[in-house]
Image (cartoon, rainbow, N blue to C red):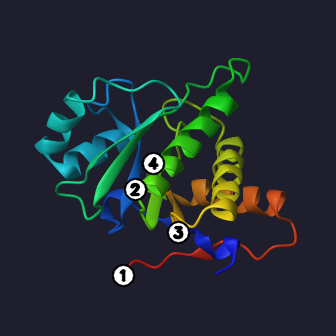
Amino acid sequence: MSNEHRLLLFEGNIVTLAVDAIVNAANKSLLGGGGVDGAIHRAAGRQLLDECRDLNGCRVGQAKITAGYKLPAKHVIHTVGPIWSGGNSKEPEKLGDCYRNSLAIARDMGLKTIAFSAISTGVYRFPGLKAAEIALTESFNHVSTYDHPAQVIFVCFDAKTRAYYEEAWTKIHPNADPLADFQKP
């Protein structure tokens, strides 16, 4: 399988995916919040919150894993993205850390499929195109080196986010086929 087809796009709701792990764009407390973080916590149920309490939070750029509980996903990898403040506070590097650390957990656990939300692009205001470029670059570098995960899925909540990923892919790999669509089983 070529690396391009190990990276997939899906426009929809991350909590519906039956994959080995979904990646939560969490806050530092890991105790739920708004946006995708709140949606994941609501869908997973109270047990996720209980397990997250035992993790004692998470630093920006780091990642921690829990069970998926009531989600179709087996696990949730929680990562804390940076808040955008103009790009002068190492936000791109910190966002890259989110992807590298989440992928490392998936690799170390032998997970085959991982689905990422668009980390930091909501209330943290990270520019969508720049975030997509970082997500795709870090993921492409990982799958070019390691066998696990076998598939990395970028979940786009809306058409605007999907367009950022498509534009970023074309910018990074101008002669490659576009990212394949992911069809839910």
Q: Are marks 4 and 2 in contact (CB under 8 Å)?
A: yes
Kindly report which numbered mark, 1 or 4, lies closer to the viewer in this rendering: 4
Where is residue 165, by image quadrant?
Answer: bottom right
Q: Please name the residue shown 39% across and 29% down the image.
A: 27
Three-letter code, disc 3: Gln
Note whether residue 105 is visible: yes
Q: Name the residue under label 1.
A: 185
Q: Mark 3 points at which residue?
A: 151
Q: Which of marks 2 and 3 is nearer the N terminus?
A: 2
Residue 120 drawn at (x, y percent): 53, 36
Residue 19, labelled with which disc? none
Task: From this view, report whether residue 129 is shown above or below residue 171.
Answer: above
Q: Mark 2 points at which residue?
A: 109
Kindly report which numbered mark, 4 or 3, lies closer to the viewer in this rendering: 4
Residue 105, labelled with which disc? 4
Q: Earlier in the sequence, mark 4 or mark 3?
A: 4
Q: Which of marks 1 and 3 is nearer the N terminus?
A: 3
Quarter containing the C terminus: bottom left
Q: Are marks 4 and 3 in contact (CB under 8 Å)?
A: no
Kindly report which numbered mark, 1 or 3, lies closer to the viewer in this rendering: 3
